[in-house]
Image: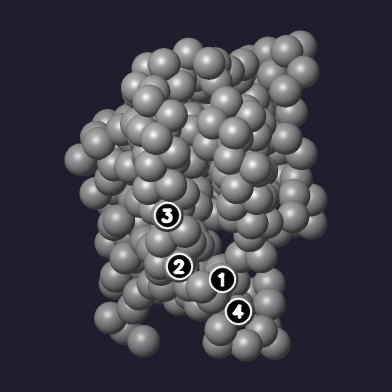
Amino acid sequence: MAKGSSGSYQAIWEFFGAELRRHREDAGMSQVELGARAFVSGTYIGQFEAAIRKPQLDIATRIDEILQTDGIFERLCRKLIDDPRYADYFAKAAELERLAAKICDWEDSVIPGLLQTPAYARALVLATHPFATDEFVDDRVGARVERSQILNDATRPEYWAIVHESVLRIPVGGPQVAAEALEHMAAMARERKVLLQVFPFSAGAPANNGSLRLMEFEDAPPTAYTETSFSGSLLDDPAVVKRANRAYDLLGVAALSPEASLALIQSAAEDFRRCASTT
C-alpha cells in the first residue's frame, strides 16, 4: 500500500485490527482477558480491533508476546509510526493524540491542527515548503485532515483549545480561506466538540510562548508537547508536566469566556468576509 494516502494508513490500521481479532480468537481469549495481560482495558482492545484507537509500540510488542505472533504487530506498528507525513519530532505526539482521553491545546500564531480546514492547512504547508511537489503537499494536508477526524469519533477526546487573538487576525491563505477557517473553528465550538477560548491582546504577555499541548490518558501518565518552527519536545517528567499544566491554567484564566471568544471569532470571520468581497 502506498504511504502517500491517508486512506492507505487507515486501511493498514484496519488490517492490524482484523489480524488482532483473528489471533486473539484463535488463542481463545476475550478482549478483557487479552487486555488484562497487556495491561490495558478490554475496551481498548476492542477499539484497537475496530481501528478506532491505535496502540502504542510497547502495547503492540506485549500483544505479540502474549499471542506468540512472531512480532507481526510490532512490525505493523513501527511501519505506521514511521509516518513521513509528519515531522520526526511530531510523529510520536501524533500517535499519542489518538489515545488521549483529554487534549488541551494552546496556539499563539495559527489555528490548532485539529481545527484547521484543508485550505487553511494547505496554505500553511505551502508557506513553509514553497517548492514542494503537489504529492508532498497533498500528503501533509491529508495527514492533518485525518488527524482531525478524532473529533468526530464516538470515543473522541475531551478537547480544550486556547488561541491568541493574533490567530484571528492573520489572513492565512487570504481573506476567503481565513474566514472559512474561523467559521469552521466557531462551528466546532457550537457543536461542543471543543471548548474554545481566545487570549485577547488586552491580556498582555501570555504564560507560554510557542505552541503547547497537554494530553491525558485513561491508562497512562499525562504528557506535554511543546513545539517551535523547527523542533518539538514530548515531555513526560511529572514536574515538567505540572509546570506546563500551570501555564495552561494561567492562559485560561486570562482568556475570554467561551461565549465572548465565540463572538470575537465570528466578528473576525466577518471582517475577512468583507475584505474578500472587496478584492
Circle number at residue 136: 4
Whether residue 96 is situated above or below residue 32 in the rendered picture: below
Residue 104 lies, in percent from the top left, at 50, 30
Q: Earlier in the sequence, mark 2 or mark 1?
A: 1
- What's the residue at 66%, 84% (across, down)? 132
- Side of 62 where 20 appears, left or right: left
The residue identified by callout 1 is: 3
Q: Which mark is residue 181?
A: none
Q: Residues within 10 Å of mark 4 (few under 14, many from 20)?
A: some
Q: CA distance from mark 3 to mark 4?
A: 25 Å
Q: Nearer the viewer, mark 4 or mark 2?
A: 2
Q: Residues within 10 Å of mark 3 (few under 14, many from 20)?
A: some
Residue at image point 68% right, 13% down: 242
Mark 1 and mark 3 lie on one chain; the one further toward the N terminus is 1
Q: Earlier in the sequence, mark 3 or mark 4?
A: 3
- Where does label 3 land, which residue? 15
For badge 3, the amino acid type reads Phe
Disc 2 marks a residue whose amino acid type is Ser
Nearer to us in this view, 61 or 105: 61
| Residue at the (45%, 67%) spot, across then down | 8
Say which amino acid is labelled 4: Phe
What's the residue at 33%, 42% (across, down)? 50
